[in-house]
Image (cartoon, rainbow, N blue to C red):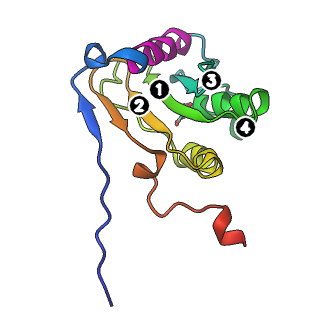
Amino acid sequence: MQEVKLSSTIKVFDNFDELDGDDSSLMSLAIEVRDTAYAPYSTFKVGAAILLENGEIITGTNQENAAYPSGLCAERVAIFYAGAQYPGVAIKKIAITAAASDGSSTEPVSSCGACRQSIAEYEQKQKTPIEMLFMGETGKVIKTASLLDLLPLAFGADYLK
Ligand code: THU
């Protein structure tokens, strides 16, 4: 038996103002669209913005449904749109921000497992890492160089061969 320690590197920024360049503009867009989320049931609004390698930017927000499981997270709304509209164009980074209606989201809100799995699919398909940036409504921002930093030992197409 071997014990193996898995580790991930994350960058932690004190706040949004510490971001620069593409990171800052992408998170700004995620913040801008967050308010337009359709989240009447949870009132938890999430905004996502994706930068593609061709410079295009895609945004998405969570879309809820009275039949609760039919709703979709902001990340998947955005990444599936990117996959549908720009097939074959690599995704460089995703910025995500989430706000609870009572203003209590002051810690970085990381993507749910289903979103991580969905993003992992695109990372494996394009064979280049997707940078992840996420924050709450305010406060610290976490950045990783790859989705796999958030989903070690990810399931993927290789297992199906
Ligand atoms: N949500 C997202 O949009 N992204 C996540 O990664 C986690 C959760 C949404 C789904 C639902 O509309 C609301 O937040 C509460 O779970």
Corner quadrant of residue 25: top left
Corner quadrant of residue 53: top right
Pointer 2: what residue? 133
In magenta segment, residue 9: no
Seen in the picture, residue 49 relative to 114 is either above or below; the reply is above
Pointer 3: what residue? 54
- Among numbered discs 4 and 1, the one appearing first in the sequence: 4
Query: What's the residue type where badge 1 is placed?
Result: Ala
Mark 3 and mark 2 in contact? Answer it, CB < 8 Å. Answer: no
* Secondary element type, mark 1: strand
* Secondary element type, mark 3: loop
Pointer 1: what residue? 95
Query: What's the residue type where badge 2 is placed?
Result: Leu
**Nearer to us in this view, 135 or 63:** 135
Mark 1 and mark 2 in contact? Answer it, CB < 8 Å. Answer: yes
Taking the image in four quarters, ligand 1 sits in the one at top right
Which numbered mark, 1 or 3, is in the foreground of this view? 3
